[in-house]
Amino acid sequence: MHILMTGATGFIGQPLCEHLINDGHRLTILTRRPLANVASCIYIDKLETVNPGERIDAVINLAGASLAERRWTPEYKREILASRLDITEGLLQLLQRLESKPKVLLSASAIGYYGHHGSDKLDEAGSCTPGFSQDLCERWERLALTACKLDVRVCLLRLGVVLDGDGGAFTQMARPFNFGVANWLGGGDQWLSWVHRRDVIRAIGFLLQRDELDGPFNITAPQAVSSRGFCEAMKRHKRTFISIPVPAAIMRLMIGEMAQELLLNGQRVVPAALQQAGFIFEFPDIDASLADIL
């Protein structure tokens, strides 16, 4: 396949590119960083440079400013929103220009789509609780789904907290444990819907090839854990000397609204659609995942 990708230089995008190239695909990558083209990759800095006669078989849209990079000021919220909607809108304009439409658009989203539901298990039909993350994901998904009007199959990738050892959330989560301090956030009973990065890459490859699949897909491991449960799992793999919580009030003081939505509320999300389609997770539980990462 010839695949157009955005967000290809990110935490998920880089290993995904390697995986796709190894599978024999050819990539066109949208990036602000000027890079030399190689045999299997072409780098562009504007979607407008794509020739309308170009044959593109699939589009993978992973672009977007990090939700956890810094405090959610009104200015940064606008940046988070624009970084997703503007690129998605640009991709839709490209799809309209192309003489031959891609077969599929895989567009990133997040489990923040559901908002806070306590301990309720949420599959892809789960209801939504309002909040910034929920509004962001809903608007992003709604825009991506307009590609259906062009007879393009659309899969929405509702990503959980992606874990691996060389970046992402795990490096922050593991830092206290590296110094012998085991901790959890707030009361510790909020759910963490996580997924190993290798399963994310595999799930994207799976959806890319399955022409009969469309709509939203929760990309989370089948077995979510609580914040306290993650702490206990880490203690089985790391030597610690003290266990202490990080009080919710301190988290709110340090990072504001982001603390409540991303760290203190949580969601208990299950990958029902992926599993019903026959996808098998390599890392279904947190102990297996941590053993691999650590």
Image: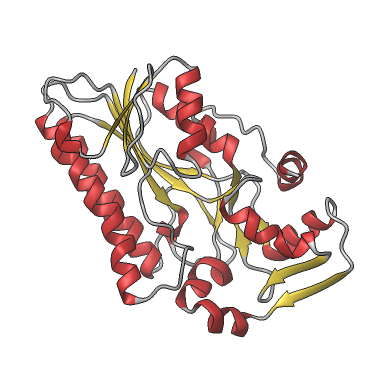
Q: Find residue 120 and report its horizontal and vertical position in percent.
A: 56, 61
- Counting labels gives 0
Q: Residue at x 21, y 18 (%)?
A: 55
Quadrant for the C terminus, please.
top right
Q: Residue at x 55, y 29 (%)?
A: 279
Q: Is residue 58 above or below residue 200?
A: above
Q: Is residue 250 left or right of residue 135?
A: right
Q: Is residue 17 left or right of residue 145?
A: right
Of residues 4 and 236, the one nearer the viewer is: 4
Of residues 266 and 40, the one nearer the viewer is: 40
Q: Find residue 38 and report its horizontal and vertical position in percent.
A: 38, 21
Q: Is residue 17 left or right of residue 107?
A: right
Q: Is residue 52 above or below residue 214?
A: above
Q: Quadrant of the rendered structure where residue 153 is?
A: top left
Of residues 60 and 175, the one nearer the viewer is: 175
Q: Is residue 73 above or below residue 52?
A: below
Q: Residue at x 10, y 22 (%)?
A: 99
Q: Is residue 151 above or below residue 257?
A: above
Q: Residue at x 54, y 27 (%)?
A: 278
Quadrant for the N terminus, please.
top left
Q: Quadrant of the rendered structure where residue 251 is?
A: bottom right
Q: Find residue 95 and report its horizontal and vertical position in percent.
A: 17, 33
Q: Find residue 269 and report its horizontal and vertical position in percent.
A: 54, 52
Q: How is the image coloured?
A: secondary structure
